[in-house]
């Protein structure tokens, strides 16, 4: 148990450390550009940036959050990315009502979405897509993230740390009771995570902890 707690602490700290500087760097550049061409967008984007950072701070010590809160978190992140790449990201999110209430650990989705941007959207010469689907069946929560891949685009350097760290965190939380699949097709990259479905009778939203 002590080893598992140590793994959780190390992995979660490393994820948080990679999130904030990268996100803030891109966000501030985006705000600077908007101040010149579309200042009316700045207020809304600042609110979403604040919500993104508040979520990370307020949930850093929580063992579980709802998948709905995770979805809101990545939507705040993608709001900034969609300003950086106007008309380039087509987003499709389909989450069942039961899946929305599922309990997961914080920042489960962020490294997967960040990889979708880095290795999919950023590397594409044209517009691309990100799809997020979550369903519950047979007491299993299944989250599937798919992003477009441009075979002719510029490939970003990959360290593999994102998926490797996520796999370690999943193992620390669930032992062998999870699955993490990846699949590459001619035009897309797919990650699928399967977890035991759990739900709290009383949940607290990210907004209530602001």
Image: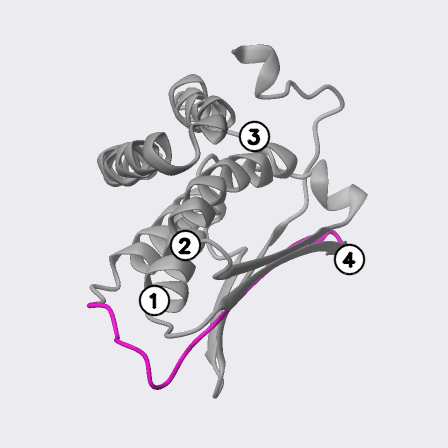
- The tag earlier along the polypeptide, 3 or 1, is 3
* Crowdedness near tag 3: few (<14), some (14–19) or many (≥20) residues, C-alpha within 10 Å: many
* Crowdedness near tag 1: few (<14), some (14–19) or many (≥20) residues, C-alpha within 10 Å: many
Taking depth in this image into account, of 147 and 111 the one nearest to the observer is 147
- The tag earlier along the polypeptide, 2 or 4, is 2
Q: What x and y, as percent, mark residue 180? A: 48, 64
Which residue is denoted by mark 2 in the rendering?
Answer: 85
Magenta range: 137-157
Which residue is denoted by mark 3 in the rendering?
Answer: 65
- Examine the rendering and report whether any part of residue 191 can be seen: no
- The tag earlier along the polypeptide, 4 or 1, is 1
Which residue is denoted by mark 1 in the rendering?
Answer: 119
| Disc assigned to residue 137 | 4
* Image quadrant where one finds the N terminus: top left
Select label 2 or label 4 by which is in front.
2
- The tag earlier along the polypeptide, 3 or 4, is 3
Q: In the rendered view, how is the structure colored? A: one colour
Select label 4 or label 1 by which is in front.
1
Reply above or below: 88 against 29.
below
| Circles 3 and 1: CB atoms closer than 8 Å | no
Secondary structure of the residue carrying tag 1 is helix
Q: Indicate the quadrant where residue 134 lies.
A: bottom right
| Residue lying at 26% horizontally and 37% vertically, measured from the top left | 29
Secondary structure of the residue carrying tag 4 is strand
């Amino acid at each position: 148990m002590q080893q598992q707690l140590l793994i959780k602490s190390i992995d979660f700290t490393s994820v948080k450390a990679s999130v904030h500087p990268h996100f803030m760097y891109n966000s501030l550049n985006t705000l600077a550009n908007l101040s010149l061409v579309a200042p009316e967008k700045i207020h809304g984007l600042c609110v979403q940036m604040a919500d993104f950072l508040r979520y990370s701070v307020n949930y850093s010590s929580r063992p579980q959050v709802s998948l709905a809160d995770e979805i809101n978190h990545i939507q705040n992140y993608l709001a900034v990315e969609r300003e950086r790449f106007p008309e380039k990201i087509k987003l499709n999110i389909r989450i069942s009502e039961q899946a929305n209430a599922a309990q997961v650990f914080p920042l489960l989705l962020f490294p997967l979405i960040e990889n979708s941007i880095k290795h999919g959207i950023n590397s594409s010469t044209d517009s691309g897509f990100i799809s997020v689907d979550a369903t519950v069946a047979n007491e299993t929560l299944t989250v599937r993230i798919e992003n477009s891949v441009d075979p002719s685009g510029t490939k970003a350097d990959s360290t593999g740390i994102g998926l490797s760290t996520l796999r370690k965190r999943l193992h620390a939380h669930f032992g062998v009771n999870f699955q993490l699949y990846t699949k590459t097709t001619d035009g897309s990259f797919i990650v699928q995570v399967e977890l035991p479905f759990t739900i709290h009778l009383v949940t607290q939203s990210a907004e209530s902890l602001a």
